[in-house]
Amino acid sequence: MPLDIDAATGLLKNVRQVLSPHFDPRPAGMVPELIVVHGISLPPGEFGGPWIDALFTGGLPPDRHPYFEAIRSLRVSSHALIRRDGSISQFVPFGERAWHAGASEYGGRTACNDFSIGIELEGTDDSPYEPAQYQSLAQLVRVLLATYPSLSSERLVGHSDIASGRKTDPGPAFDWPRLRALLS
């Protein structure tokens, strides 16, 4: 099914919506100008399950895995998540500020959450991402570019590009040439 964004709400149509409380308005006059690709798995190295949703909605149970205790106080979110099978869930409307980038800098500007859209891919730095994820990511990026003229395919980066030394995702397993070919 083709993706479409309701420009008035910033919500994708025909995808699973799991709205996060971890967002706030973008600063006045700020629009999305950057797309940041992330990689995530919870627990680390494991795929599937409800844990990413739980993290992004503030309900991660610290007693379910030792790693969860270490991240229990995090208040994070992303605009969208693409699972291993290519399915998309949306957590934050695209016009709002999701809390995905943390301390970050791009093109001399800090606080990338203010002007970026964060897309999480279920994966790890060293596990190949699935073909369905590349297809869904390319489709999502195309619809974002069509909806938000302030975005550009030249401003499509990894978390590691804006938080160098602090973050490594989506990692060396992410095939940037493959994504760029799907977008051309």
Image (cartoon, helix red, strand yellow):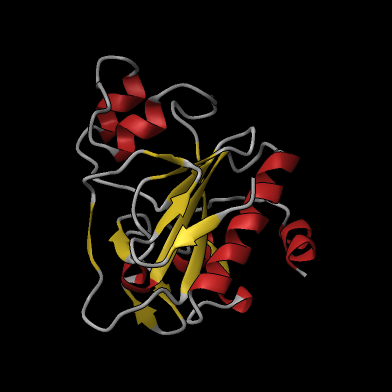
In percent of width and height, residue 144 lies at 53, 66
State whether residue 165 appears in this view.
no
Is 86 left or right of 107, judged from the image as shown? right
In percent of width and height, residue 14 lies at 50, 44
Which residue is at the front of the view, 93 or 53?
Answer: 93
In the rendered image, the quadrant that contains the C terminus is bottom right
In percent of width and height, residue 167 lies at 46, 54
In the rendered image, the quadrant that contains the N terminus is top right
**Residue at 54% from the left image edge and 28% from the top image edge:** 45
Quarter assignment of residue 72 = top left
Give the residue furthest to the top. Answer: 64
**Residue at 34% from the left image edge and 52% from the top image edge:** 92
In the displayed structure, would residue 7 be above or below residue 92?
A: below
In percent of width and height, residue 142 lies at 63, 65
Is 97 left or right of 45, judged from the image as shown? left
Q: How many marks?
A: 0
Is 100 left or right of 178, judged from the image as shown? left
State whether residue 122 appears in this view.
yes
**Residue at 21% from the left image edge and 45% from the top image edge:** 21
**Residue at 21% from the left image edge and 80% from the top image edge:** 28
